[in-house]
């Protein structure tokens, strides 16, 4: 369940700077600021990120890029009522951070992942794509809960 969501997220995060028809990424928001000196692009207010396989909503998205420009994505951070939806599942939290160099995704703040047969909740979800592991943690005394059905 989580692996499919993460693969879809990786498609979003890894293709942000690559404009090809098959992997087109559209980002909209109320405001857009590009800070070339600090290599940051920021979308604020009702941000929507759309790809052919995943949609993401947040109040703000900040993309840090390297010396090679906007195709050299260093990190992707979405904050404020983050929602990530694929055809098979839906995830939400307060903050999502993806680091392409380490291939680690952190989704934090009242995280919920749901699909047709299950719902997982917890304070934090960490997904390491290099090791193919997903870990829900009950940080700071919080608990992780899973509800599973046999639909």
Image: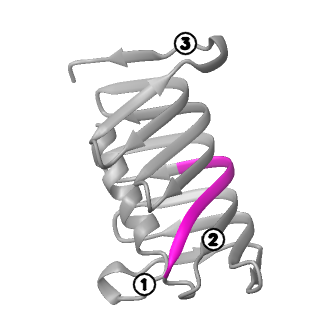
Nearer-N-terminus badge (1/2): 1
Residue found at x 48% / y 41%: 91
Q: Is residue 111 magenta?
A: no
The disc at residue 143 is: 3
Vertical arrangement, residue 55 with respect to residue 145, above or below: below
Residue indicated by mark 2: 64
**Which one is in front in this view, the residue at disc 2 or the one at disc 3?**
2
Residue found at x 42% / y 84%: 18
Q: Secondary structure at mark 3?
A: loop
Q: Which quarter shows the N terminus?
A: top left
Q: Secondary structure at mark 2?
A: strand
Residue indicated by mark 1: 18
Nearer-N-terminus badge (3/1): 1
Magenta stretch: give its range: 72-83
Q: Where residue 31 sits: x, y (%)?
A: 78, 76
Q: Where residue 14 sits: x, y (%)?
A: 41, 69
Vertical arrangement, residue 129 with respect to residue 120, above or below: below
Relative to 56, 87 lies left or right: left
Residue found at x 53% / y 23%: 122
Vertical arrangement, residue 1 with respect to residue 55, above or below: above
Q: Which quarter shows the C terminus?
A: top left
Q: Is residue 73 magenta?
A: yes
Cα–Cα gap, marks 1 and 2: 14 Å
């Amino acid at each position: 369940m989580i692996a499919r969501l993460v693969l879809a997220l990786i498609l979003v995060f890894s293709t942000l700077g690559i404009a090809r028809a098959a992997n087109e990424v559209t980002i909209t928001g109320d405001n857009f600021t590009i800070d070339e000196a600090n290599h940051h692009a920021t979308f604020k207010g009702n941000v929507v990120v759309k790809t052919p396989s995943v949609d993401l909503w947040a109040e703000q998205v900040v993309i840090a890029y390297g010396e090679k420009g906007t195709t050299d994505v260093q990190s992707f951070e979405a904050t404020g009522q983050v929602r990530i939806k694929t055809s098979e599942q839906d995830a939400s939290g307060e903050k999502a951070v993806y680091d392409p160099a380490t291939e680690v995704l952190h989704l934090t703040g009242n995280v919920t992942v749901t699909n047709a047969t299950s719902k997982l909740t917890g304070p934090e979800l960490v997904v390491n794509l290099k090791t193919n592991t997903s870990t829900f943690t009950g940080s700071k005394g919080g608990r992780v809960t899973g509800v599973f059905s046999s639909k």
